[in-house]
Structures are given as structure tokens and as C-alpha cells.
């Protein structure tokens, strides 16, 4: 079973994080975000880690659980300094025995990303997700000199049309040019199939 899982992991990583032709066909965010998904996402835990931060003040980081509705992720981060460079990193993990990097490992510099998506599917995906999920961050450079307050939701549309059921963790990290962490988030969630297919082999 472990062998099968590893094979599947490798295939999907190739399909999805490659910069080749596949990336675009497999997941074009703007085209695919409106299409229905065969699974649901339930956020179970939300953490801001590596606190306290050196250059920012975290006023709020909590999950608001809602019965039969998406949980809300509430963040309020004061950024007194001004930044002309902001590294944004998204990394998805899938829980095999422990959490392993899976499908998404994307990073981009924020000022550059706000300016131009360069017709790169990975950048389009990142920009699209940031625009829909943490819209307070979508503004021209510089970043900072303000408090970013955001109520966010993790939606199925941010993920590909088909992903294996199971437990996941999405990490999002924002760092300065000198690699100082401004905020580092972990969203723990479960993917459940809508239909009767439950196995890792049937996604
Ligand atoms: C997706 O849906 C939104 C609003 O429901 C709409 O404005 C947008 O044009 C749609 N995009 C595509 C590619 O169909
Ligand atoms: C910070 O924001 C204030 C008010 O929005 C503005 O007047 C000031 O010029 C900004 N400072 C910097 C360094 O951008
Ligand atoms: C930034 O710092 C983290 C630890 O906080 C380290 O793991 C990482 O390798 C550093 N990245 C760069 C580009 O220096």
C-alpha cells in the first residue's frame, strides 16, 4: 500500500507542479474555478506559527467554526514597516503517515506578482487564489504601513478538480527580502469525496 501511494504521489506531482504544458491544462485557475468539484473541504484547525514575529504584530489569528457552512479564518496583522519585496510561499502537504509535500509548492515575490502574471499558470493560480482569498493583500507595491485584516475561507475552487480524499495541511508564509517571517500560517483540512468513491486510487 505504501508503494502504491508513493507512485501516485510522484505522478500527481509531475502532472501538477511541472512548468511544462501540463500545468496549464491541468489547472487553469480562472477557467476551472467555476467548475464543480467532486469533493468538499472541511477546515479543522488554523494556526499562525513561529510567533511572535520580529517586524509585525499579530492581533488576531483564529478559526470561526460554523455548522454546515465553511469555517472562517480571521486574521489581523499589523505591518508597521514598508516592504518593496514580499516573498509569498504556498506549500500543500498530504498526510500519508506524516505530512508530506504534495501537489502545490509555489512561491512568488508579491510586488512582481501584483504587477504581472507573465502568462505563467503557476503565477495565475497564486494571484487568483490571493485575490479571492486574501483580497486585502491585492494592491500595488509597497506592502505594509498598514494593518491587514482579513476574513478568509478555504474553498474547493482553489484546488484542482480532482484530489485524493484525506487529511491535508496548507502552509502559507510571507517573508521579507532578508528572510524575516512576517506571518506563517497553517491550515489543516480534510478532503471528503462527495460520491461513493473513497479510495486514494479513484480520484
Ligand atoms: C465564474 O463565475 C463568476 C461569477 O459567478 C463570473 O463573473 C465569471 O465570469 C466566471 N468565469 C468563467 C471563466 O466562467
Ligand atoms: C504610511 O501611511 C500613511 C497614511 O496612509 C501615509 O501618509 C504615509 O506616507 C505612509 N508612509 C510610507 C512610508 O509609505
Ligand atoms: C529562510 O529562513 C528559514 C528558517 O526560518 C530557512 O529554512 C530558509 O532556508 C531560509 N530561506 C532562505 C532563502 O534563506
Image (spheres, rainbow, N blue to C red):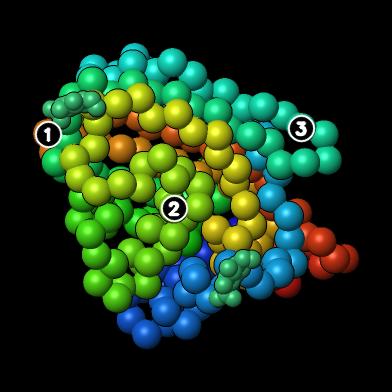
Question: What is the x, y in percent for residue 173?
Answer: 35, 38
Using the rendered view, name the quadrant where residue 22 is placed. bottom left
Q: Secondary structure at mark 2?
A: helix
Question: What is the x, y in percent for residue 151?
Answer: 55, 34
Give me the disc on residue 178: 1
Q: Residues within 10 Å of mark 1 (few under 14, many from 20)?
A: few
Residue at which label 2 appears = 131
Ligand 1 quadrant assignment: bottom right
Q: Nearer the viewer, residue 53 or 7?
A: 53
18 displayed left or right of 8: left
In the image, what residue occupies the spot 14% across and 41% down?
A: 84
Residue 178 position (above or below residue 199): above
Residue 66 position (above or below residue 18): above
Q: Is residue 91 visible?
A: no
Residue at which label 3 appears = 66
Alpha carbon of mark 1 to alpha carbon of mark 2: how far?
25 Å
First in sequence: mark 3 or mark 1? 3
In the image, what residue occupies the spot 35% across and 25% down?
A: 147
**Which is more foreground, mark 2 or mark 3?**
2
Question: What is the x, y in percent for residue 43?
Answer: 66, 39
Amino acid at each position: 500500500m505504501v508503494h502504491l501511494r508513493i507512485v501516485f504521489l510522484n505522478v500527481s506531482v509531475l502532472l501538477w507542479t511541472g512548468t511544462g504544458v501540463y500545468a496549464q491544462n491541468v489547472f487553469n485557475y480562472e477557467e476551472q474555478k467555476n467548475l464543480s468539484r467532486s469533493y468538499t473541504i472541511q477546515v479543522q484547525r488554523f494556526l499562525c506559527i513561529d510567533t511572535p514575529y520580529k517586524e509585525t504584530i499579530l492581533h488576531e489569528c483564529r478559526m470561526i467554526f460554523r455548522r454546515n457552512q465553511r469555517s472562517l479564518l480571521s486574521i489581523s496583522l499589523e505591518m508597521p514597516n514598508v516592504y518593496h519585496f514580499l516573498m509569498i510561499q504556498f506549500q500543500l502537504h498530504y498526510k500519508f503517515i506524516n505530512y508530506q509535500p504534495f501537489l502545490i509548492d509555489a512561491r512568488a515575490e508579491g510586488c512582481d506578482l501584483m504587477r504581472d502574471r507573465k502568462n505563467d499558470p503557476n503565477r495565475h493560480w497564486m494571484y487568483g487564489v490571493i485575490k479571492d482569498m486574501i483580497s486585502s493583500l491585492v494592491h500595488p507595491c509597497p506592502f505594509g504601513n498598514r494593518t491587514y485584516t482579513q476574513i478568509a475561507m478555504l474553498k474547493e475552487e482553489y484546488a484542482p478538480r480532482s484530489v485524493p480524499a484525506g487529511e491535508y495541511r496548507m502552509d502559507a508564509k510571507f517573508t521579507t527580502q532578508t528572510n524575516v517571517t512576517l506571518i506563517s500560517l497553517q491550515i489543516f483540512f480534510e478532503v471528503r469525496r462527495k460520491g461513493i468513491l473513497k479510495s486514494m486510487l479513484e480520484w
